[in-house]
Image (cartoon, rainbow, N blue to C red):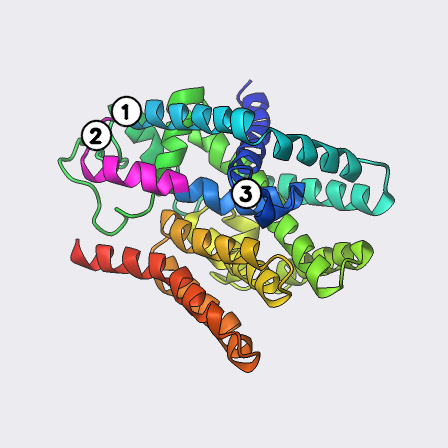
């Protein structure tokens, strides 16, 4: 039953990302399902970071956060039903269009799902890296009804949380899911989150291919396959390929293999101008949510954003967008300052 529940929650996560994308005005995403889904990913974890972190710092019980997060998700759904019905209808039309019989889309979907299952098996049967942290910590939080105040190794209830990890909330999210749905982190992390992140990763690659190859969907599909194959067959210990293949759900892995692609695709949207509002918003949200996964995001994300965008903004003399570049880096800088002050 746990495997069945874990599989169902994959759909819950994908639906949550889609709903979060619908919160934004149509001019940002043009009611396209893929645009909604992709911007919804950083929006979801940004909202959770902003919600969970104050309660973690104040040492509130876990059930307070679980209840509050449930209420927030219900409010998101209510907002969509009241104020985003047109977006919802247009998105469903776009989804039906995407689901029409198409060999390339079918092959892409099957291979991505197969890859997700393969990596879930990898993570579950081969990789035990840091499981005491990523799985033990959420379990001990639920057991003690605290937000990471119990040592998962000794079982001792502490009066403090780890200063090193205090900004990271991805394990808190796992605890909330465990407490709310009864889905054990061993399944939620190894299966549910792993498959979900693979789908998100491939979707960003596909969207990037659409930009690079000017809307040619077959070329975008080939770009997605080749990119993943290159990543899988350039293995190195503790490198990006290692994190992707064996530690897919870990926060540091997400910052290693996924968030750089996220930044690149949103930057392409800015570069090609057509979706630049979507691109800038995505970059800002990525800068906010990075801290939820790993402290490495504090410096990696702003450096990536500045490296990718600064040259062509200057060369194309797009001076009005320089403040947006600075704004996209501000959240990461703010997390870094907060971290040092703690």
Q: Residues within 10 Å of mark 2 (few under 14, many from 20)?
A: some
Q: Are marks 2 and 1 in contact (CB under 8 Å)?
A: yes
Whether 58 is among the magenta residues is yes
In the depicted structure, whether residue 74 falls above or below residue 203: above
In the depicted structure, whether residue 193 falls above or below residue 230: above
Residue 244 lies, in percent from the top left, at 55, 53
Q: Which residues are magenta?
A: 47-64
| Residue 4 shown left or right of residue 73 in the figure | right
- Residue occupying the point 33% across, 26% down: 68
Local SS, label 3: loop
Q: Are marks 3 and 1 in contact (CB under 8 Å)?
A: no
- Residue occupying the point 41% across, 65% down: 302
The residue wearing badge 3 is 25
Per the rendering, the mark at residue 60 is 2
- Residue occupying the point 23% across, 60% down: 337
Tell me the CA gap for discs 3 and 1: 31 Å
């Amino acid at each position: 039953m746990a495997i069945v529940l874990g599989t169902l929650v994959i759909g819950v996560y994908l639906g949550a990302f889609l709903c979060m994308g619908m919160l934004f005005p149509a001019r940002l995403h043009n009611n396209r399902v893929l645009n909604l889904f992709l911007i919804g990913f950083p929006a979801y974890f940004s909202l959770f970071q902003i919600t969970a972190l104050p309660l973690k710092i104040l040492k509130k019980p876990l059930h307070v956060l679980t209840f509050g997060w449930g209420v927030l998700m219900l409010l998101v759904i209510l907002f969509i039903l009241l104020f985003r019905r047109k977006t919802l209808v247009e998105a469903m039309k776009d989804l039906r269009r995407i689901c029409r019989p198409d060999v390339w889309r079918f092959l892409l979907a099957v291979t991505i799902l197969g890859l997700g299952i393969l990596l879930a098996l990898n993570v579950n049967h081969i990789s035990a890296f840091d499981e005491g942290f990523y799985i033990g910590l959420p379990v001990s939080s639920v057991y003690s009804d605290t937000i990471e105040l119990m040592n998962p190794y000794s079982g001792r209830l502490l009066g403090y949380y780890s200063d090193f990890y205090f900004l990271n909330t991805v394990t808190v999210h796992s605890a909330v899911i465990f407490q709310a749905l009864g889905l054990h982190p061993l399944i939620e992390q190894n299966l549910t989150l792993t498959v979900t992140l693979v789908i998100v990763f491939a979707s960003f690659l596909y969207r990037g291919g659409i930009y690079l190859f000017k809307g040619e969907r077959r070329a975008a599909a080939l770009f997605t396959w080749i990119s993943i194959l290159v990543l899988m067959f350039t293995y190195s210990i503790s490198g990006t390929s290692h994190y992707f293949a064996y530690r897919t759900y870990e926060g540091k892995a997400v910052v290693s293999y996924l968030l750089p692609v996220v930044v690149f695709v949103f930057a392409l949207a800015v570069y090609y101008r057509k979706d630049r509002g979507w691109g800038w918003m995505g970059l800002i949200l990525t800068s906010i949510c990075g801290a939820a996964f790993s402290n490495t995001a504090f410096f990696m994300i702003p450096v990536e954003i500045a490296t990718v965008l600064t040259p062509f903004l200057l060369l194309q003399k797009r001076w009005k967008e320089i403040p947006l570049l600075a704004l996209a880096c501000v959240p990461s800088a703010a997390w870094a300052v907060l971290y040092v002050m703690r």
